[in-house]
Amino acid sequence: MRLGVCDWGYCVYRAETAACIGDERSPNPLWRTESTCVSCANFAVTERHRPVWQARLERNLALITDQRLDGASRALANTRIAECERILSDLSAIEGPHGQAASRKPA
């Protein structure tokens, strides 16, 4: 098991459960994205990562207001919005006393 660090969370990397289909040593850098990580059993996020998810949510909320957006792009933006809302909700739910994040993985 290895710990991978990225802007949007941590990867407690185990090849056999990696959604990014990495090798025995590390995650696959081509498939390692926020959306892939969110669906991975290896993914963990902490309060430290909240700004990344909040910014992603705001970008996608702004994007869906653009009338020029085609249906497939709008569906992708809505999927990303749901991912962000889930992560942010989970972070809020596990926040401990005095604004400290609890040390468990959001569901």
Image (cartoon, rainbow, N blue to C red):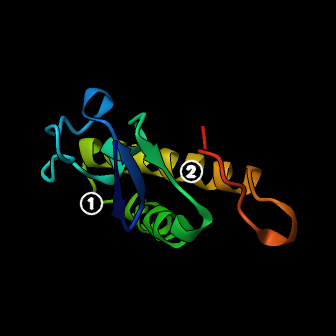
Q: Quadrant of residue 100?
A: bottom right
Residue at image point 49% right, 68% down = 58
Residue corresponding to mark 2:
87
Residue 95, how many percent across, how many down?
A: 76, 58
- Placement of the C terminus among the 4 image quadrants: top right
Gap between marks 2 and 1 measured at Cα: 28 Å
Who comes first in sequence, dot 2 or dot 1? Answer: 1
Number of other residues with Cα within 10 Å of mark 1, as a class: few under 14, some 14 to 19, many 20 or more = few
| Viewer-side residue, 13 vs 9 | 13
Of residues 15 and 19, the one drawn nearer to the viewer in this rendering: 15
Mark 2 or 1: in front is 2
Question: Residue 86: which numbered mark, if any?
Answer: none
* Left or right of 72 in this view: 45: right
Which residue is at a point 17% across and 45% down the rendered structure image?
25
Q: Is residue 32 left or right of residue 100?
A: left
Residue furthest to the top in view is 16
Tell me the kind of residue under disc 1: Arg
Compared to residue 82, the image places residue 58 above or below, namely: below
Quick one: label 2, few (<14), some, or many (20+) residues within 10 Å? many
Residue 79 in the image, given as x and y percentages of width and height: 41, 43
What is the number of the mark on residue 68? 1
Nearer the observer, 44 or 36? 44
Residue at 13% across / 38% down in the picture?
A: 23
Q: Quadrant of the N terminus?
A: top left
Q: What kind of residue is marked 2?
A: Ile
